[in-house]
Amino acid sequence: MSIVNEGKKCYYSVDEKGIALMEINNPPMNALGTPILADIRDTVQKSLADDAVRVVVFTGAGKAFIAGADINEIKGLKTAQAGIDFLANGQDVLNLIEKADKPFIAAINGFCLGGGTELALACHIRLIDESAQMGLPEIKLGIIPGFGGTQRTPRLIGRGRAYELVLSGNFISGKQAELYGLVNRSVPKGQVVEEAKKLAADIASKSRMAIKGAMKAIREGMLMEYYESQKNEREIFGTLCETADKEEGVDAFLNKREAKFTDR
């Protein structure tokens, strides 16, 4: 199995089902800095352009998912403009994931802190090892989460819990993260990547066109007025009604057989 971007700090390999396992590997704790963000951006862009990739499972190599931003780089931010530029770059990379038309599943292992939590929140689905820890500890450094953490967190779990996580900077366990709704679910220790791959395989077996349509309806609808979002949903549904995959899916259901989608 070939590796795309081998030799960089972020790379992926894709299997015969179309599942890309994307890893960040920046020992010891996979900290995010400008060079790492550049590798992530390049690797994500390549996965989106790669027809062999249907679903991406994103995880961290070693004992951490991502344990935060590069503190030494943050130490060097001495002006407001330097801080703004640093965040604009990070936000842009994470927005690339969030706006992707292929599902990204975060398989959260070990420490997932600061920028790591923010990257996980940009993914469409999150599974976490029950022994892992999540948190937004930037407040302890006299700053705030800036890669979208103050915005995605309350939208996902509500303002009260978002205030608690951001203002305390405390870590929570995988099980607590599930309870808060910060992740989809926690899984037994050591099984998060395999569980993410199982979910990815389920998604990858569906029509690529329907997956893209569903993601577009959810992503765009969240930014629209409610009835406008329903109109958008109708239009996407109508487009899918003209596809060969819709005909195949319905025929397979009626004839009690497995559908064989062709992404047309």
Image (cartoon, helix red, strand yellow):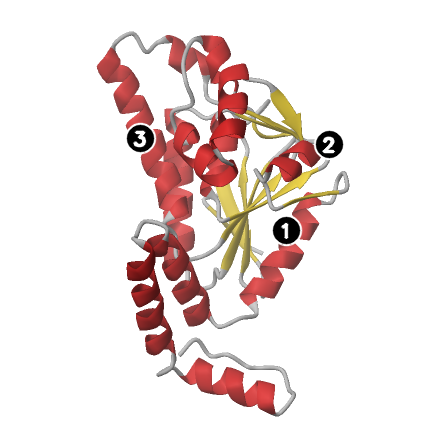
Image vertical order of residue 252 relative to residue 146, above or below: below
Of 152 and 25, which appears nearest the observer? 152
Residue located beneath label 2 in the image: 131
Q: Rate crowding at label 2 as few (under 14), some (14 to 19) or many (20 or more) other CA atoms within 10 Å.
A: some
* Residue 101 on image: x %, y %: 39, 57
* Residue 145 on image: x %, y %: 42, 23
Q: Earlier in the sequence, mark 1 or mark 2?
A: 2
Which residue is at a point 41% across and 57% down the rendered structure image?
218
* Residue 77 on image: x %, y %: 32, 11
Which residue is at a point 43% across and 53% down the rendered structure image?
47
Image vertical order of residue 203 relative to residue 164, above or below: below
Which residue is at a point 62% across and 92% down the rendered structure image?
255
Point out the image quarter for the N terminus: bottom right
Q: Is residue 127 visible from the viewing direction of this image?
A: yes
Mark 2 residue type: Ser
Q: Rate crowding at label 1 as few (under 14), some (14 to 19) or many (20 or more) other CA atoms within 10 Å.
A: many
* Residue 161 on image: x %, y %: 54, 29
Image vertical order of residue 216 relative to residue 188, above or below: below
What separation in Å lies between label 3 and label 2 (alpha carbons)? 31 Å
What separation in Å lies between label 1 and label 2 (alpha carbons)? 16 Å
Look at the numbered discs 3 and 2 and tell me whether their residues touch, using CB distance below 8 Å: no
Residue located beneath label 1 in the image: 196
Q: Find numbered disc 1 in the image and state the secondary structure of the residue it sits on.
A: helix
Of 51 and 180, which appears nearest the observer? 180
Q: Rate crowding at label 3 as few (under 14), some (14 to 19) or many (20 or more) other CA atoms within 10 Å.
A: some
Of 78 and 211, which appears nearest the observer? 211
Residue located beneath label 3 in the image: 89
